[in-house]
Each structure stands twice: as C-alpha cells, then as structure tokens.
Amino acid sequence: MTDGDVDFSPGDGPTSGISVTLTAGTLQAIRERVGKRGVSAYLEKAAQRQIERDNLDELIADFDKVHGPADPEAVAAKRARLTGGATKAGAAA
C-alpha cells in the first residue's frame, strides 16, 4: 500500500520530501529562528497551524450561514470577560 492509498491527519504518517520555494527574506528569518537543520520541522508546524486556521475559518463561515454573523458588541463583551478588559463600544471582533 502506498502513501496515496491512506488518509493521514496533519502531523501523522511518514515524512515525504518535496521542493518548496520561499523568498530569501522568509528563509533567512526561519533560519535565524531555528538554524539550518530546523527548517523542515518549522515549516511542518507552520503548515499544521495554517490547516487548523483554515478549518476554523470554514467552521465559522458555516456557522454564519446558519445563524448569521456574530453581534460585534456581544463579541467585545465576551472578549473583555475572557481577557479581564473593559468592553469598548463598536469594538471589532
């Protein structure tokens, strides 16, 4: 059975080598953070985080289709409650 026959979740399964093109500045910033030998692991984690964000965006869009967009004032009040800050009228979510 090949890797193409099995569905893996992000972060699971064997590793596969690919070619990735990055701008020089982006690659330099990554290498400054993790060194030359940490680039693949850094990109793996970044890709996993992006997939999580994409999935969350899809869930929010689906929720908004069914229930309508969230009330900005209610979001601001809940954010203030979670962060211990004061609510701001008209605060963006």
Image: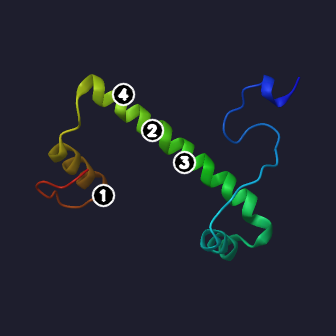
> Is 58 rendered above or below residue 41?
above
Residue plotted at (29% across, 26% down): 65
Identify which residue, 19 or 73, lies in the foreground: 19
Residue plotted at (75% across, 65% down): 38
Name the image quarter holding the N terminus: top right
| CB under 8 Å between discs 4 and 2 | no
Looking at numbered disc 1 in the image, what kind of residue is underneath it?
Answer: Thr
Q: Position of residue 80 (x, y in %)?
A: 23, 55
Quick check: 50 left or right of 89? right
Q: Which residue is mark 2?
A: 56
Q: Earlier in the sequence, mark 1 or mark 4?
A: 4
Looking at numbered disc 2 in the image, what kind of residue is underneath it?
Answer: Leu
Pair 1/4: label in front: 4
User: How would you rate the neighbour count of disc 1 (Cα within 10 Å): few for under 14, some for 14-19, many for 20 or more?
Assistant: few
**Structural distance between the alpha carbons of marks 1 and 4:** 26 Å
Label tally: 4
Q: Position of residue 82 (x, y in %)?
A: 30, 52
Q: Earlier in the sequence, mark 2 or mark 1?
A: 2
Looking at the rendered structure, which numbered label has been put on residue 50?
Answer: 3
**Structural distance between the alpha carbons of marks 2 and 3:** 10 Å
User: How would you rate the neighbour count of disc 2 (Cα within 10 Å): few for under 14, some for 14-19, many for 20 or more?
Assistant: few
Answer with the quarter of the image where residue 12 lies.
top right
Residue plotted at (29% across, 30% down): 64
Q: Which residue is mark 1?
A: 83
Answer with the quarter of the image where residue 29 lies.
bottom right
Looking at the rendered structure, which numbered label has been put on residue 62?
Answer: 4
Looking at numbered disc 3 in the image, what kind of residue is underneath it?
Answer: Gln
Q: Earlier in the sequence, mark 3 or mark 4?
A: 3
Q: Position of residue 19 (x, y in %)?
A: 76, 53
**Structural distance between the alpha carbons of marks 2 and 1:** 21 Å
**Structural distance between the alpha carbons of marks 3 and 1:** 24 Å
